[in-house]
Structure formats: C-alpha cells, structure tokens
Amino acid sequence: MFSQIMGDPAARVFAAILLVALSGVPGLFIRTGATGQRLATAASAVAAALALPSVVTMLLARQTATYSVFWNLPFGACEVAIDPLSAYFLIPIFVVFLCGSVYANGYFPAARHGYAEARVTFFYGLLAAAMALVVIARNGALFLIAWEVMALSAYFLLVTEHEEPEVRTAGLVYLVATHIGTAALFVYFSLLNAHTGSFLFPAAGGLHLPAVAATTLFALALFGFGAKAGLMPLHIWLPAAHANAPSHVSAVLSGVMLKMGVYGILRFLSFVDAPPLWWGGLLTGMGLFSAFMGIALASSRRDIKRMLAYSSIENIGIITAGIGIAVIGQATGNARLAYLGMAGALLHVINHSLFKPLLFMGAGSVIHATGTRELDTMGGLAKNMRWTALFTLAGVVAISGLPPFNGFVSEFMLYMGFFGEAASSSTASSYLVVGAPVLAMTGGVALICFVKLYGVAFLGAPRSAQAAGSHEAPAAMLLPMAALAGACLFAGLLPQALLPLAEAAMSVPAPVSAGLGGSPVEPGWFTFAGLGLLGLAAAVAVLLGRRLSSLPSSASRTWGCGYLAPSARMQYTGTSFSEMFTTLTKGVVRASVIHTEIKGFAPKPSAFGYVPEETVIERFLVPMFNVSGSCFAFVRRVQSGRIHIYMMYFFVTLVTLMIWTR
C-alpha cells in the first residue's frame, strides 16, 4: 500500500508538506549540539526530493488531483487539490525552503544561538508548510486557517531578536497589517459563500455575478491579497519586517511569502469567466506605481537589507503589472497580449524567487562578516569574500534585468507586451504603451540601485575596521548561494525549460494562449544572445588578463583624484552615489537633513546627517492613521480596566445576537 501511495505524485507532495511541517520538531526536544538543526536540514532535502519532481510532472501533464479531507467543522466539505497553478507556486516554496535550511547551518547555528535556533527552525518549517497548504486549499475556511498559521509563523520568525526595540516595533506593525488584510479576506470568503452557497472554491470560470458583487469581491481580494504581496500603498509592514528578520527568513518572506498574495489574486481571477477591462487597468496601474516607487525608495536606502526589501515591492509591482496586461488582453480579445502579460508575470514569480533569496543570503553573509547592515561603513569586501562577491554579482545582474540572467527574460516579455502588442492594437489596450516609459525608467533606477549596492559594499577600500577584518562565509552559506546563482544563469540561458511550466499554469487563470497556435516568443533567441554575451565577456577577460600579465605589477590604493595620501573617506558612499537621483525625485523620496551651522574663524566640531524618508508612509499613511485615531478616541473610554464591566459587554453582546438571529 505504501508503494502505491508513493507512486502517486500528489501523494508524494502531501507527504513532503507533512515532512516540512514536522522538520523543526526534533530540535525542540534535542537541546544539545546541532543534531536538531541537521535533522531539519535533512528533512528539507528529502521533502524537496519528493515534491519538486512530482509537481513538475503534474505541471507538464496539466494534471489535477483533488482529495476530500474529513473534518467536523461547519464549513462544508474540506477539499485540497493540486492543479497546475498550485503546482507552479509549490516550486519556489520547496526550492527556497531547502536553500534557507542549508544556509541556516552557517548563518544561525545551534551552537551559538541555543534554544533560539530551535524556535526559528520550528517556525521556519511551519511557515513553509502553511504556504504549501495555502496553495492547495480548496475550501475558504481551510484557506484562512492556513493563511493565519502562515502569518503567525512569520511573526514569530520576524521577532527572533526581540530584545531590540526596532524588531519589536517591526513585529507589531506586521501583526496589525497582516490581520487587517486577513479581515478583508474573511469578508471576501463570506461574500463568496453567500453568492455560491458553499465555502468550496468555484470552478475555473464558474463565477457569474452581477457587476456590483463582482467588483466588491475584486476590491476585497485586491486589498487582502495585495497587503500580503506588499503592493503600494499596502506595503507598510514590509520594509521593516524584511530588514529585521534573520537573513534566511528574509529570503523566504521576500522570495515566497509575498507570492502568496500574487497567488490569491490569480486564484480569484480564475473564478471569473470574463474580468472587465478596468480590472486590468487598475492592476497595471498599481503594479507600475509599486514598481517605480519601490525601486526609487530602494535607491536611497543605506541599510542593505532595507534596500532589498524595497526592491521586493518593485518586483511584486512588475508581476502585478503583467497580470494586469493579461487581463486587458483577455478583455480586448488580444490573445498575444494576454499571453505575454501572464507568461511574463509567472516567469517573474519564479525568477524573483531565485535572485531575491540569493541577494538576501549575500546580505546575510556580509552582515555575518562585518556585523553591520550599514552600506556606508562597508567597502572592499570582495578582497576577503571572493565567493560571496561572485554570487552576489550574479544576483545583482539578474535583478537588474540584464542578460544572460533570468530577470532579463521575464521583463523582456513584459516590454514586448507594452511596446509591440499594445502599440499595434486598435483597441483600448493601445493605452498600455504609456506604461512602457515607466517600466523602462524603473529598470534604469534598478540599475543605479544595485550598482550602488555592489560597488559600495564590495569594491574600493574598506571604510571601517569591521569591513577591513571581514572573512568569507562558511561552506553551508555559500552552497545554497551557488545553487541559486546557477539557477539564475540556467533560467536566463534556457528559458525554454521554464516556459512550458508557466504555460501550464496559465491554463488555470484563463486560456490566455487560445487561438495563438503556439507561443509568440522564441526562447531560443535568449539562449543564443546569452551564450554570445558570455563568450564575449570571456574573450575580453582573457585579453585583459594577458595584457595585465605583460605589464609590471605594483601595489597601491585605488587612484583618488591625484592625492598623495588617498583615504577611504574620498570614496563614494552609498548616500553620495544616489544623492543626485534622490534630489531629482524629492517629491517621491524625501530626506531629512540634519546639520550644524558652521560659524566663525575657528568653528566648533559639526555633524551632518542624512535620513531618507518614505513619502507614502510618512506623508500619507501616518497622517491618515493619526486622523483616524483622533476620530475614534472615544472608543478608548470603554476600556475601563474592570473585569465586571467587560463581562457586562459580553452579556449585552450575546443577548443582542440572540435577539437578532431569532
């Protein structure tokens, strides 16, 4: 019987999810040594070996497996299913979970962190299992249970270093924000149940509602799932959460958990037979706004992890814009536009799940070596951290959307949609061409941002004693970084390996490729261009190497504008590098400048401080919350602190509900 169960690919996936959920349990009881952590890493490897071949097989076969689970809750039948869309989102869950589990052995070892490591390992596995349950749940109540387990697991991981006030504040903001989004999802599933008569998910294209009801559900889904994805202006929790979590946790939060919001939006769109045109326009507009604002704010950051957190908002915006393009293509009957938008969005889901965890792990290696997240105190790290510098460079090139790495492929497909298909259409989709300059500008600012990150951190001379004394990360941290860097290069050179998976997942939200007679994209072109670029780079490296070997060698500091005694203080810092762009975009990225006025012939010591702000949060959301707090200040009066008064509230509420239900 066991062999029959394990012969079913869906059963192997379910076994892998259970193994992931239990992976951290041994560490709660094994308090000495690193045995618990190593067992969790072994469990993650076995789970990935079970699940990844199975989900790929089911994807390529476009197979759907549905199972009913017994429960006695009053929410109807409990179903779980793995269809192509679910299978596609399971891939990054297991890949990033495995890489993070291996990475944690070097970054967060049990020998140094004791019981904190056991707690992190347990919730790390629970988070991954909850995300997997989110994508296979087919009952609204089960979905919300898994969603809440995911949210709480992420919270306990986020507040690992709860001794720090900044960490506690970030955890509180995350907890409030995620439950506001969850409240919207409670209303969403309740209305869905009211219209369909069941908590079970509707079949693909099976939800036919009046315009007002459909719009209400769309708004709730966009708010609830958009808050989890980090779309602006619903991103209030994201920067601080990703910056203050352990780096391998940040890799999962950014690389995978944000995609659960994307999955929720796609799943809702799969219910609707014909989404209206304005839905696509709104998704595209929100996506482009998030993309540009996210990368503009990232470019002004000095905290390396906060910079990566803001760039996640940019990439989620790109994915959302792609989904919006696909909806516009559907609504206007432009099958090529629908294909390019959805394929680009789905490919970017996988691509971002590879290069963003790579960059967070690279940042973790830098923090592990220098003890700081402050970019301006780094410099010259490539000398002592050659492998970390190499793998981080791969992530930087990928996230900047440059060939031959994977970020170029998905972003190029969206460019094709904006420029080619929109411009050649005579329908309302022609207005999409207006978004092309926004996407192009976003790509340019991303290049500025990550040249700053890599150049300031790894090149030049050390700016502090911590940077000068840096050391290479251990093998446990380098191995998953090498695997992710290799995956980024593979996906960029051979997108034809991933495109069939994306095409299979497209069949669930909508048959966007119907009538095309094949893909409008020739993936072999990416292979040819990528290999040509790699060959050219290798030839230039060989020529430069021969040239340098023929010249006399000398050792000195990097040239510093002719100064006889150059100093690291003469180098660009991250702040000075992005100062011009920050000045040009001061309406978007505001900064507080604190300085002491210099007076007299012998001035006293002075200081200069530059603190970038976030316009959306500090100039819009915070004042709005302050006004709301003032309006509802009277509610505080009911908090008398007396238990008998609270019991009276409960009694009055119960009596009111009993009368109302009668």
Image (cartoon, rainbow, N blue to C red):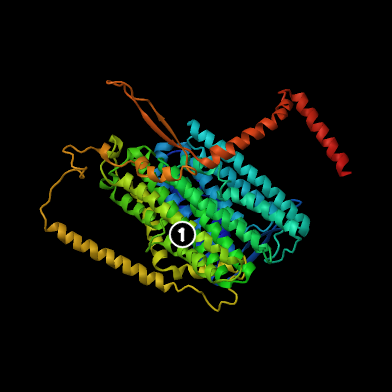
Is the residue 596 above or below the residue 79 in the image?
A: above
Say which residue appears at 74% left-offset and 27% top-offset: 638
Q: Which residue is at the front of the view, 141 or 349?
A: 349
Residue 54 in view, yes or no: no
* Residue 446 image point, x, y percent: 42, 52
The residue sitting at the bottom extreme is: 517
Quadrant position of the N terminus in the picture: bottom right
Image coords of residue 582 (percent x, y): 42, 43
In the rendered image, the vertical position of residue 547 relative to residue 179, given as above or below: below
Q: Is residue 582 left or right of residue 282?
A: left
Q: Which residue is mark 1?
A: 351
Quadrant for the C terminus, please. top right
Q: In the image, residue 536 lies at what x, y percent?
A: 28, 66
What residue is rendered at 65% in x and 63% in y? Answer: 277
Q: Amino acid at mark 1?
A: Asn
Q: Tally the numbered discs.
A: 1
Q: Is residue 313 left or right of residue 647?
A: left
Residue 296 picture location, percent across and down? 46, 47
Where is residue 109, by image quadrant?
A: top left
Check disc 1: other Cα within 10 Å, few if <14, some if 14-19, many if 20+.
Answer: many
Which residue is found at the position 76% from the left and 51% from the top? 74
